[in-house]
Image: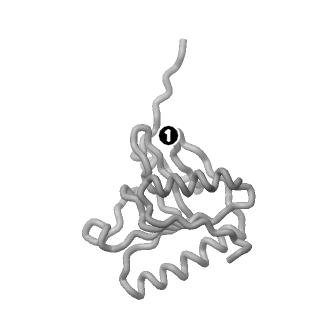
Amino acid sequence: MAIEQKLVTAEDMLAMPDDGMRWELIDGEIQRMPPLGAEHEETAGEVLARFREHVKARTLGRVYGAPGVIVRRNPDRVRAPDFAFVSGGRLPEGKSPTGYLQEAPDLVVEVVSPTETATDLQAKIQEWLDAGVRLAIALYPAAF
């Protein structure tokens, strides 16, 4: 007898207790993301800080560090770029949503980890573009 597995929705995942780990939802299945390492986090944090300063000084929109973004429904897919930018005019009433971003950000940045293959990176960038992201950047820490 086969047991039918219930697919998890974005709303189910959002309601889960925070256990301090990074998670993504891939076609209704929760996947744990491994810790990223100091170099990766330093690079992502530095780029995020510089970009946030620029955006805030000019009131351009919102900058998010590793936000959950719903990129597809039925089955749900929630991805978390290293950071994202959404222009102010695209946010309802200029405010951030209480849950995951439902619209594709204008910009996402993915800091490339040492174990990430070129094929995986290309697929991830293509997924962002297919979801409606206007610009997706892959950033190599050694080049920053």
Look at 37% across and 80% down and name the residue there: 60
- Report the residue marked by disc 1: 27
Q: Is residue 19 left or right of residue 113?
A: left
- Spot occupied by residue 28 in the image (x, y as percentages of width and height): 48, 39
- Spot occupied by residue 77 in the image (x, y as percentages of width and height): 47, 46
| Colouring mode (rainbow / by chain / secondary structure / one colour) | one colour
> In what element is the residue under mark 1?
loop
- Spot occupied by residue 83 in the image (x, y as percentages of width and height): 52, 67
Q: Nearer the viewer, residue 139 or 29?
A: 139
Crowd class of label 1 (few under 14; some 14 to 19; many from 20; radius 10 Å): some
The image quarter containing residue 1 is top right
Q: Tag count in the figure?
A: 1
Q: Residue furthest bottom?
A: 57
Q: Residue furthest top?
A: 1
The image quarter containing residue 91 is bottom left
Look at 58% across and 55% down and name the residue there: 22
Look at 64% across and 51% down and name the residue there: 120
Q: At label 1, which amino acid type do we have?
A: Asp
**Residue 90 sits above or below residue 119 on the image:** below
Q: Is residue 39 left or right of residue 83?
A: right
